Image: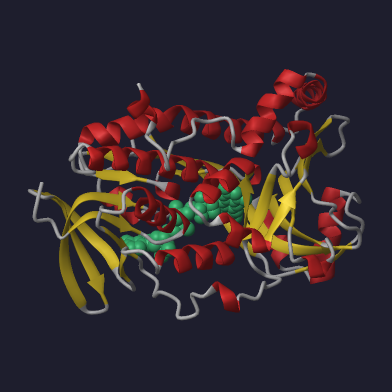
Amino acid sequence: MKNSDTDVIIAGGGLAGATLALTLARVAPNLRVTVVEAFPLSADALPDSYQPSYDARSTALAWGSRLIFEELGLWSRLSEHATPIQQIHVSDRGHFGATRLNAKEYEQQALGYVVDNRWMGLCLMRELLQTNTQWQAPAEVVDMTPSEQGVSVTLKSGDDTSTVTAQCLIVADGGRSGLREKLGFQASHHGYNQNALIANITTSDSHQFVAYERFTDAGPMALLPHGSPSRAGHQSALVWTLSDNELADVLAMSESDKCQRLQERFGWRLGRFTRMGECNHYPLTLTTVGEPIRPGVALVGNAAHALHPVAGQGFNLALRGLMTLAEQFRLAAEQGRPPGDFQILRRYHELHRPDWQQTVQFSDSLIRIFGQSLAPIAAVRDAGLIGLDLLPGAKRLFARKAMGTGGRRAVINGPAASDKK
Ligand SMILES: Cc1cc2nc3c(=O)[nH]c(=O)nc-3n(C[C@H](O)[C@H](O)[C@H](O)COP(=O)(O)OP(=O)(O)OC[C@H]3O[C@@H](n4cnc5c(N)ncnc54)[C@H](O)[C@@H]3O)c2cc1C
């Protein structure tokens, strides 16, 4: 197909859209890629001026995601402000069961890393500005129709409206994706009747690079090692699951009362909670789309799947999918086929689907099993945690999920997997 304005349009330049754009610039440099982002490109898009903020939101990147960012040539920059997770401690409040994963057991430097979202965005942007990727920002994709070239996309920027034709549209507009609905993709939404409260916490004891996942009758919580070395290991990133009522209660509290409530739920493994920064909160739903592809269109990132954040899997899963998509686009380019070719998109989905399904199931069952306060279920999960600690095979499987090394690894630098057959 010829005469399109661009080869690939990515609607949404968040973490998923920007990472895909950078990967395509590395893997298939002859593809013309345009990113459309609703927010203006920040004038301070330079990591050199970056100052970590106490209130920054962060993401737990699995070890496997580090390997991907290494392949993209981004890791050495990202690692300047990445806090390693050397151990994961999973426990159940008021019950005996507990399990520990230790990076040394798996001969890795770390199980994963905690990185500020803003820092990741700046690093991605810095690299992208050195590529041929085109940006339309601030601009929104407001409409899409199939066209002779593939897809015709209507953009709105202020009062101006324009049309761009592309061979393929990638929808990366996030969890509340309006474009997914507009395109008629059927998404299933499962509400957990819970909210995630996110904040950074100061603790009297050092985290010692341990991430805590704690399940309580009121819902799960995670405390991840976070913050610059200057804070000497006394800062953690909190993801605290709360019902609507308790969330309203907690938000109305003073900082010291919030710390005290958290202390009651979490216990004393990190000493005393002395400070809680800005609190952000999100309603929790599991959203997935059965088949995220159509001729000329693919959904990626949170537009395709939004998971419960306690297991820290959402972006890690998205990243593995983006690598598989880029791998298939590279193959298509080598074969002279357009990136929106349905066979190419179908192959991408077939390859990524097992990882997607297992990760969604892993994250959802963790929440369902550990969100139950009924005594028999609590006993089973205690047995599960103890069993996990005692059975190396089960523990290794759990560790592979946590480290993001269980799924298929796309070949983005060398020949794609199917080239080798
Ligand atoms: C509280 C919380 C904690 C999390 N913690 C973790 C974790 O520890 N580990 C992990 O792996 N994952 C985690 N996740 C998941 C992770 O944050 C998401 O997977 C990731 O942010 C998804 O990025 P995205 O680019 O798909 O969506 P978004 O980040 O939402 O980006 C979408 C972008 O699209 C733009 N946009 C929207 N509509 C349009 C339009 N019409 N036209 C153009 N642009 C548009 C928006 O401006 C935005 O920039 C967490 C999620 C939450 C909510």
**Rendering coords of residue 269 (x, y %):** 90, 49
131, 2: nearer the viewer: 131
Residue at 40% across, 71% down: 39
- Residue 270 falls left or right of residue 318: right
Residue 376 location in percent, x, y? 78, 22
Viewer-closest of 357 and 6: 6
Instruction: Indicate how the structure is coloured in the image.
Output: secondary structure
Q: Position of residue 96 (x, y in %)?
A: 88, 30
Indicate left or right for 23 with 78 as reference.
left
Q: Is residue 57 above or below residue 350?
A: below
Q: Residue at x 88, y 57 (%)?
A: 206
Residue located 56% across and 72% down the image: 47
Tell me if residue 65 comes above or below residue 279 in the rendering: above
Return the x and y of residue 142 as percentages of the image width and height.
Answer: 24, 62
Q: Is residue 293 visible?
A: yes
Q: Is residue 218 left or right of residue 22?
A: right
401 or 274: nearer the viewer: 401
Residue 175 appearing in the image: no
Name which quarter of the figure residue 382 lies in: top right
Number of on-image labels = 0
Q: Quadrant of the C terminus?
A: top left
Q: Quadrant of residue 353?
A: top left
Q: Nearer the viewer, residue 419 or 53?
A: 419
Write down the quadrant of residue 372 in the picture: top right
Q: Is residue 245 above or below residue 322?
A: below
